[in-house]
Image: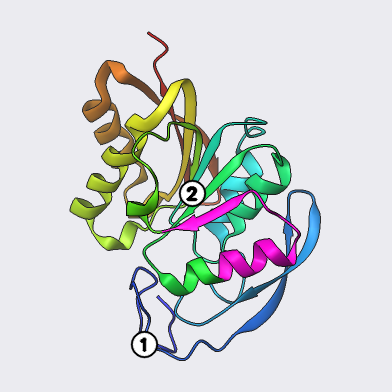
Amino acid sequence: MDEAAGDHYFTAQPASPAERREITVWLAEREVTVETAGGVFSSFRLDQGTRALLASVPAPPPSGDLLDLGCGWGPIALTLALRSPHARVWAVDVNERALDLVRRNAERLGLDNITAVTPDEVPDDVMLAAIWSNPPIRVGKEALHAMLLHWLPRLVPGMSAHLVVQRNLGADSLQAWLADQLGAAATVTRSASVKGFRVLRVEASSA
């Protein structure tokens, strides 16, 4: 939530003033300047959870369809696009202001391989070579679970999702729940633990 505005970052059309600003962050081993705004998640800085995720994930696949689920202003999507210029990166969010920021930031960085859209705009036949996500835990357990069970089964067999979740916001219980729900379709492990955050790895079964 943007503390000054009172909008949730998962609000589709934030009512708060955009209050656009530029910030300088470190993405894909380089310093970049990006645009953020009020009414989106962590508009003043690169948040700790995303920082933990980006510091611990392996290199993304060089091609295929890659997903940043709950993209905000785009740090994960931009990193995927910078590291995998021949891949198609889907930046997905319900927040229209966030999607506009991702498009602006992609243009600012000269990236033409990012498609910033709402969840319903991703074609049903798109299968994913990777999912990187700092998921919106605060949408509530029911909505979060539905979201994850919609996207995780779209992983290409043998490919992986990486999710960062704060330990005190239920990372360990989410890991157990995912393992139970996905069963033989995927292997769920903790791939890293960084400053109170867990990075969960979900690998789709090859069989």
Circle nearer the viewer, 2 or 1? 1
Does residue 100 appear left or right of residue 21 in this picture? left
- Residue that badge 2 annotates: 197
Q: Total marks drawn?
A: 2
Decide: is 33 above or below 139.
below
Q: Which residue is found at the position 74% from the left and 49% from the top?
A: 28
Look at the image and tell me in which quarter the C terminus lies: top left
Residue 44 in the image, given as x and y percentages of width and height: 60, 77
The residue type indicated by label 1 comes to Ala
Decide: is 64 above or below 145.
above
Decide: is 88 above or below 35.
above
- Judged from the image, the secondary structure of the residue bearing numbered disc 2 is strand
Q: Quadrant of residue 87?
A: top right
Is residue 19 found inside the magenta-colored segment of the image?
no
Residue 197 in the image, given as x and y percentages of width and height: 48, 49
Determine the CA span between mark 2 and mark 1: 31 Å
Magenta-colored span: 101-117
Q: Which residue is found at the position 36% from the left and 87% from the top?
A: 15
Residue furthest right as drawn: 30
Instruction: State the residue in front, 115 or 46.
Output: 115
Does residue 111 appear left or right of residue 102 in this picture? right
- Judged from the image, the secondary structure of the residue bearing numbered disc 1 is loop
Q: Residues within 10 Å of mark 1 (few under 14, many from 20)?
A: few
Residue furthest left as drawn: 142
Is residue 102 found inside the magenta-colored segment of the image?
yes
Does residue 143 appear left or right of residue 194 in this picture? left
Of labels 2 and 1, earlier in sequence is 1
Decide: is 130 above or below 167.
above
Instruction: State the residue in front, 38 or 13.
Output: 13
Residue 30 in the image, given as x and y percentages of width and height: 81, 55
- Residue that badge 1 annotates: 15
Q: Residues within 10 Å of mark 2 (few under 14, many from 20)?
A: many
